[in-house]
Image: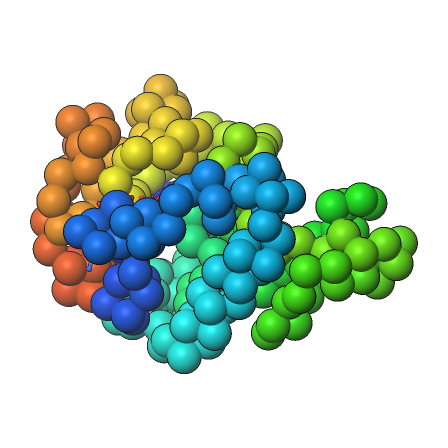
Amino acid sequence: MQKIVILTGAGISAESGLGTFRAEGGLWAQHRIEDVATLEGFQRDPKLVVDFYNARRAQAAEATPNAGHLALAKLEAAFPGEVVLITQNVDDLHERAGSQKVMHMHGALSGALCGSCDHRWPAPMVMAPGDPCPACEKPTARPDIVWFGEMPYDMEEIFDHLASADIFASIGTSGNVYPAAGFVAEARRHRAQTVEFNLEASLVASQFDDIRIGPATQTLPLWVSEILAR
Ligand code: APR
């Protein structure tokens, strides 16, 4: 069996009704990154930031996994231990679709983090500024989201997976943000076969062996059935 390493971005959750970041009217057209996705923004106005993530948490809870999420869960079920899913997304649609090995490199709406002692715990549906940390009891709870300028989670393990991938698939990501946008180059360096799934060519499309243009709810089930038929 081949090891398949998958990277997903906001595009895989778009057909579940969750907005992407850089499309017309996307999240970064509605909010300034420096206000809602940086530590400085949180320190400047914790209520604005906590409310931003409370709204996204509520929206994600209302959303349901789509055929793209389900196709990836089906692929992993067919090849247990051989499929690694790295997501830039902070929603839990991959888990709710049945995917087991999901690495949230940008954190997750379901998590809370202590700004003082780094303790992490399941976030309440509605966080408030000054919520106490259950471990150190300081009023320094924050969303467990990796903000711009902060180190993504699990990078060492992620690069180990990229080094041993036979297939690297990137789904619904524009290739704007590193280190995720650099994963295809790393996978190629280790001679993985690379494929991109998007509505349009991403900024790193030229680095892929294969590009499947179309909605992920259509292109992914087709791709998974091709692999299962091999
Ligand atoms: N099927 C496939 N791809 C889609 C679909 C769809 N139905 N809908 C949108 N896309 C593609 C878009 O063409 C675009 O290339 O998804 C991509 C979304 O790009 P972005 O909005 O830039 O989101 P993403 O690449 O995930 O952003 C990466 O940037 O702001 C940070 O931390 C944030 O994790 C995020 C990171």
Instruction: Choose between 74 and 130: the one closer to the eye.
Output: 130
Count the marks: how many?
Answer: 0
Tell me what residue is drawn at x 11 percent, y 44 percent. 200
Left or right: where does residue 53 sit relative to residue 167? right
Residue at the spot 53% in from the left edge and 57% down from the top edge: 48
Q: Image quarter for residue 201?
A: top left
Q: Position of residue 139 (x, y in %)?
A: 80, 56
Tell me: residue 142, above or below residue 225. Answer: above
Q: Where residue 116 appears, x then y in whole percent?
A: 80, 44
Position of residue 85 relative to residue 66, above or below, is: above
Check the picture and name the quadrant holding the C terminus. bottom left
The answer to whether any part of residue 191 appears in the image is no
Foreground residue among 37 and 156:
37
Q: What residue lies at 15% left-to-right and 64% top-to-bottom?
A: 218
Work out which residue is located at the far right of the displayed protein and give it: 136
Please say if 59 is above or below 171: below
Q: Position of residue 49 (x, y in %)?
A: 54, 54
Color encoding of the figure = rainbow
**Residue 60 seen in the figure:** yes
Q: Quadrant of residue 215?
A: bottom left
Q: Is residue 175 above or below residue 220?
A: above
* Residue at 47%, 74% in the rendered image: 58
With 56 as the anchor, is 184 left or right in this view? left
- The image shows residue 19 at horizontal and vertical percentages of 30, 61
42 and 184: which is toward the camera: 42
Please give left or right for residue 4 compared with residue 107 in the image: left
| Residue furthest out toward the top | 189
